[in-house]
Structures are given as structure tokens and as C-alpha cells.
Image (cartoon, rainbow, N blue to C red):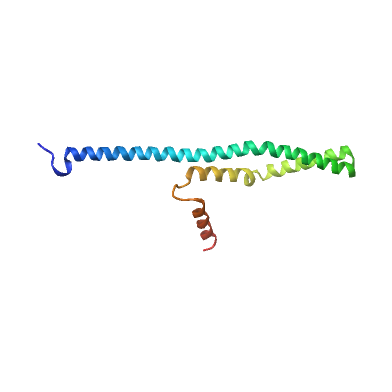
């Protein structure tokens, strides 16, 4: 019995080739998407690795300057205690508000990275959020 028309061997072979090509294209798209997302994530991590030490160095110099200013008015020990108190207060504020200051932006960044649709860019998302805010 010979296949004819829609079930011919050549047609089935052509469909197999097209399905294989489609699967290969899906794999390539997944690889490119993964590379894009990893690049964004690694860029953020490298930015943090570079910026955090620079910020620490700046804080050391600013602390020294603040101690010098306070020493002129309050004495050495009081100046050191005031600067230590300022850092303790900043630490307490960060601990109290860690969810809106640290966790929420981190979760937002990671969720955008993972669940971002490929067809949308940031300007489209901004326009959608403006439409929601101003109906």
C-alpha cells in the first residue's frame, strides 16, 4: 500500500526536518535568553563588588572628618562615641526597614530578571504602570 497526498514519505520527512529545526531554534532562543539574564545578573554583582569597597573607603574618610569636626567642639572620646552612635542608628534603621530597603528591591530585580517577557522592554512596562496609576 502506497501513501499518497498528505501522508507521503517526502512530506513526512519535510515535516520532521521542520520540527527538528523548530526545536533547535527554541533551544537557541533559550540559550540566548539565559545568557542575557546571566549578563544582567553578573553585571549587577560586579557593580556591587566594585562599589561596596569604594563606599566603605568613602565612609572611613567621612567618619574621620566627622570625628575631627566633633573633636573641635566636644572632645576626642565624645566625638568617637557620637560617630559610633550615628553608625549604630543607621544600622538600626536599616534593620527595622530591611524589607522595603533591601528585600523588596532585590525581589523585584530577580523577578524582573526571571519573569521578564522577551517582547517587552522597560519603556513598555513604564507605560503600563502609568496607565494603571492614571486610569
Q: Where is residue 125 in the image (x, y as percent from the top left)?
A: 50, 53
Identify the residue at image location x=33%, y=38%.
23
Up the image or down, 131 lies above or below 11; here it is below
Q: Above or below — where is 135 with respect to 99?
A: below
Q: Quadrant of residue 5?
A: top left
Q: Is residue 69 left or right of residue 133?
A: right
The quadrant in which residue 52 appears is top right
**Which residue extends farthest left?**
1
Residue positioned 63% across, 36% down in the render: 49
Q: Which of 62 and 117 is in front in this view?
A: 62
> Would you say residue 40 is visible in this rendering?
yes
> Depth check: 97 or 44 in front?
44
Residue 134 position within the rendered picture, expressed as x and y whole percent measured from the top left: 54, 62
Residue 48: x and y in percent read 62, 38
Q: Residue furthest bottom?
A: 135
Q: Can residue 82 be seen in this view?
A: no
Give the residue drawn at x 63%, y 47%. Answer: 100
Q: Quadrant of the N terminus?
A: top left
Lateral position of residue 13 relative to residue 80, left or right: left
Quadrant of the rendered image containing residue 25:
top left
Is 77 situated left or right of 40 in this image? right
Count of numbered circles on the image: 0
Where residue 117 sits: x, y (%)? 45, 47
Amino acid at each position: 500500500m502506497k501513501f499518497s497526498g498528505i501522508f507521503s514519505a517526502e512530506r513526512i520527512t519535510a515535516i520532521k526536518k521542520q520540527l527538528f529545526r523548530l526545536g533547535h531554534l527554541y533551544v537557541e532562543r533559550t540559550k540566548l535568553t539565559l545568557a542575557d539574564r546571566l549578563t544582567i545578573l553578573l553585571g549587577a554583582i560586579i557593580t556591587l563588588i566594585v562599589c561596596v569597597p569604594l563606599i566603605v573607603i568613602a565612609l572611613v574618610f567621612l567618619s574621620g572628618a566627622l570625628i575631627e569636626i566633633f573633636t573641635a567642639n566636644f572632645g576626642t572620646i565624645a566625638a568617637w562615641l557620637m560617630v559610633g552612635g550615628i553608625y549604630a542608628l543607621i544600622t538600626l534603621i536599616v534593620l527595622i526597614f530591611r524589607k522595603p530597603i533591601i528585600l523588596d528591591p532585590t525581589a523585584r530585580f530577580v523577578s524582573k530578571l526571571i519573569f521578564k517577557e522577551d517582547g517587552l522592554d522597560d519603556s513598555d512596562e513604564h507605560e503600563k504602570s502609568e496607565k494603571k496609576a492614571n486610569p
